[in-house]
Amino acid sequence: MEELGVSIWWFLFAIGLLIAEVTLSGFVALFFGIGAVVAGGTALVGFDLPTQIWIMAIVSLLGIIFGRKFLVSRVQVNKDVIKTNVDALIGREGVVTYKIPPFGKGRILCNGESWSAESVAGIAIEEGEEVVIREIRGVTAIVDKISNPLEG
């Protein structure tokens, strides 16, 4: 009869973890919940508490290692995340406001903000030329010159 009481606690724990998964959306609490359900089943069969804990840990770990990657690839979690701050600048175009020397720093204007900038290729980019931001390193935009098809 004691097994029934322990298994109920495991099942309540599992329900709590599954509810937590709804708010966390990382598929980690889900696998701990599955591990708790399996541990609750082992309690019903009559395994002792240390064995139940080990089984929960092993099932959860295997689920996280093998199942999480599968679920993340199938369920598009956070697919509509809007890029903000620095991430939103990648791919944006700007204009050089202070010449970027070879392997040196100049300045660009992008979205009304002035940024320290370096050339991705280590080449000089003259003032007034258009560039695209490829990366942000600290407070420096790493830029690439936008090629003009008429220049050849």
Image (tube, rainbow, N blue to C red):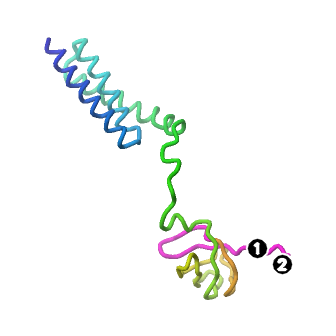
Percent x, y of residue 117? 57, 79
Disc 1: which residue: 147
The three-letter code of the residue at mark 1 reads Ser
The one nearer the camera, 136 or 104, is: 136
- Please state if 98 lies on the left or on the right of 16 as rendered: right
**Crowdedness near tag 1: few (<14), some (14–19) or many (≥20) residues, C-alpha within 10 Å:** few
Q: Quadrant of residue 149?
A: bottom right
Magenta span includes 147: yes
Helix, strand or loop under label 2: loop
Most extreme residue toward the left is 2
Magenta span includes 46: no
Percent x, y of residue 129? 70, 82
How far apart marks 1 and 2 lie (CA) works out to 8 Å
For the residues labelled 1 and 2, say whether their Cβ atoms are less than 8 Å apart. yes
The three-letter code of the residue at mark 2 reads Glu
Percent x, y of residue 127? 67, 87
Which region is colored magenta?
133-152
Percent x, y of residue 126? 69, 86
Q: Quadrant of residue 93?
A: bottom right
**Crowdedness near tag 2: few (<14), some (14–19) or many (≥20) residues, C-alpha within 10 Å:** few
Q: Residue at x 83, y 78 (%)?
A: 151
Disc 2: which residue: 151
